[in-house]
């Protein structure tokens, strides 16, 4: 269990700092061990691990200027079906990012709205607000006003909410 928590914390931090090369190296080294671990059967822990991995892989492909692998769509859909409260939100967020990178803004927006609804149902206000900032970018700021969503993130304790959003949606900002 500590291995999983350590891996996810490091991946999360590397996504936040944009150090995709270090994140990919970490995945290469630690992901096989995670795939064999019994803790993988705990849906909530699996949700966090798989969502963080998808976040890194999508961001890395975007930074490298290449199209994300088709397999990531399957993984995002599988994540959205996990029986954990925030799984659907993270899976739909990943699908939104992938659709945006494919150039399909409408599908990206639909997935993002489904993600927000899932986070709202799970009472994950911080994740919902992060999505609302991204939604404002997708719809040219005609959705939830950007500053209102950023204020929600500030209220949740983020001094720099713009960075909290940029590390999850670098392709939008």
Image (spheres, rainbow, N blue to C red):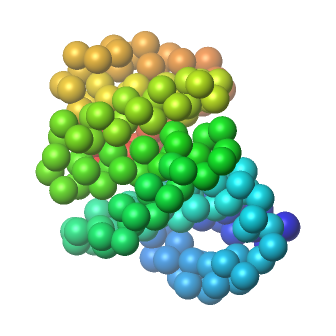
In this view, the residue in front, 136 or 151, is 136
Q: Residue at x 68, y 60 (%)?
A: 46
Query: Which quarter of the rendered picture does the C terminus lie within?
Result: top left
Position above or below: 130 against 41:
above
Residue 40 in which image quadrant: bottom right
Q: Is residue 60 visible?
A: no
Seen as rendered, the residue at the extreme left is 103
Position above or below: 168 against 116:
below
Residue 7 place in picture, x, y as percent: 69, 69
Residue 92 place in picture, x, y as percent: 43, 44
Residue 62 in which image quadrant: bottom left
Q: Is residue 86 visible?
A: yes
Q: Residue at x 57, y 77 (%)?
A: 27
Residue 118 place in picture, x, y as percent: 52, 31
Query: Which quarter of the rendered picture does the N terminus lie within?
Result: bottom right
Q: Residue at x 54, y 50 (%)?
A: 81
Position above or below: 155 against 137:
above
Residue 17 place in picture, x, y as percent: 50, 57
Q: Is residue 107 left or right of residue 58?
A: left
Q: How many marks?
A: 0
Q: Residue at x 77, y 77 (%)?
A: 37
Position above or below: 110 against 66:
above
């Amino acid at each position: 269990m500590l291995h999983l928590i350590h891996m996810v914390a490091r991946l999360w931090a590397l996504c936040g700092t944009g150090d995709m090369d270090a994140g990919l190296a970490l995945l290469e080294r630690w992901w096989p061990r995670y795939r064999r671990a019994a803790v993988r059967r705990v849906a909530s822990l699996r949700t966090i691990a798989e969502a963080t991995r998808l976040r890194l892989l999508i961001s890395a492909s975007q930074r490298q200027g290449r199209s994300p692998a088709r397999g990531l769509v399957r993984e995002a859909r599988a994540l959205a079906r996990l029986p954990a409260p925030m799984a659907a939100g993270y899976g739909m967020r990943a699908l939104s990012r992938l659709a945006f990178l494919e150039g399909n803004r409408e599908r990206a927006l639909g997935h993002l709205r489904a993600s927000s609804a899932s986070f709202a149902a799970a009472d994950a206000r911080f994740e919902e607000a992060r999505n609302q900032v991204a939604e404002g970018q997708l719809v040219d700021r005609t959705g939830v006003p950007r500053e209102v969503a950023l204020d929600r993130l500030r209220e949740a304790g983020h001094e720099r909410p713009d960075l909290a959003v940029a590390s999850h949606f670098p392709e939008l900002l």
